[in-house]
Image (cartoon, rainbow, N blue to C red):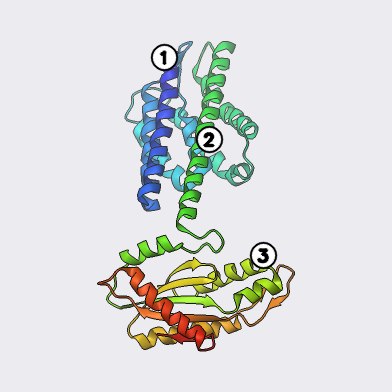
Amino acid sequence: MQSLLANFSILLFMHLCIQSVYYLAFQKRWPSQVVAVAHIFIVAIGIICLYMLPVSLDGYLYDLRTIPMVILVLYHGYQYGIPVLIMITLARFAFPGDFIYLEIFFTLLIPTVVTMLVRQKLFRNLTYLKLFFYFVGIWFISDAIVGYIISEDITLYSYLMRFISFQLSALIMYFFIQMSTNNLEMSKQLRFYAEHDSLTGLLNLRSFLKKAKAHETHLIKMVAMLDLDFFKQVNDKYGHLNGDRVLADFAMFLSDQGDNWLVARYGGEEFIVMLEASTKDEAYHRMKDLQHNLSKQRFMTEMGDEIKDVSVSIGLAELDLEKPLMASVEKADKSLYRAKKNGRNEVCF
């Protein structure tokens, strides 16, 4: 029983380490390559530890190494599974014992290959019941066969205890993985909505100002304030839901206009852009190109009717690095006011 609990503990500690890596990566925004390498090494070390603490039952030694191997491939595919399989196979030869090739073949290689083959179909609608039946099959092609070949005096009690411990461990691991995955997804959503506008998906003003300060370049930085012309008439004529559609579609259009633009929703029908240009004239012409491209953009209502004459007024100001960012934003806002006063669909400095 102590050895069995030790196996449980290794599996749970392995999961805790992996969970910690993903949360640290989420907080510090580590690259995915670093996370993948850490994940692979943790699983490999955990499985090697399982070798060292086998469970003895009726003279037969077994462990739960198949479970983390199968779950790793189930969630992450061959990209994670093959490196771990190679590492633990090589490490297995460092431990003395009989039937090494037999163990590797049935407890590691066959379950890994089978899971790779059925992964996409199995993982599509994975449930506890589906996972249980899958691990029943995995147990029969791994531990059950090895136990039958190696053990001379196999008993029903031995098979039953090994089966129960195998299934229980698999379901417990799956439960904790699902809980951790859901919590991490929720954290990502909370971060996204803390940094982005919920309607358009653009940065909110607070995040825009933070990123703009951190962005360094040798080019001129320009701040542009954009305001959709006569937007109240769109709401009055087509309804607020279709007005929201226009805002969301315009936000997508705006994001596609420049690779090096920093775009955010300022509020209402106003948007803010930070762009880089070699000269002020270049920034001006880029804004005029934006207006020209917008005149070709089609905006549709939910019922499929076209919303015509969507245009935007733009105010530009050079970013003064010696003053607070909002001072330049206020200058751009004053330029926007002149653009609207001049008849709208204009660009003003």
Q: Nearer the viewer, residue 89 or 242?
A: 242
Q: In this view, does 253 lie above or below 208?
A: below
Q: In this view, does 241 lie above or below 228?
A: above
Q: Are marks 2 and 3 in contact (CB under 8 Å)?
A: no
Q: Which of 298 and 226 is in front in this view?
A: 226
Q: Which of marks 2 and 3 is nearer the N terminus?
A: 2
Classify residue 292 by image quadrant.
bottom right
Classify residue 11 by image quadrant.
top left
Classify residue 121 by image quadrant.
top right
Residue tagged 1: 2
The amino acid pointed to by label 1 is Gln
The amino acid pointed to by label 2 is Pro
Residue tagged 3: 241
Left or right: 24 as drawn, with respect to 114: left
Residue tagged 2: 111
Q: Nearer the viewer, residue 97 or 300?
A: 300
Q: Which is closer to the viewer, label 3 or label 1?
A: 3
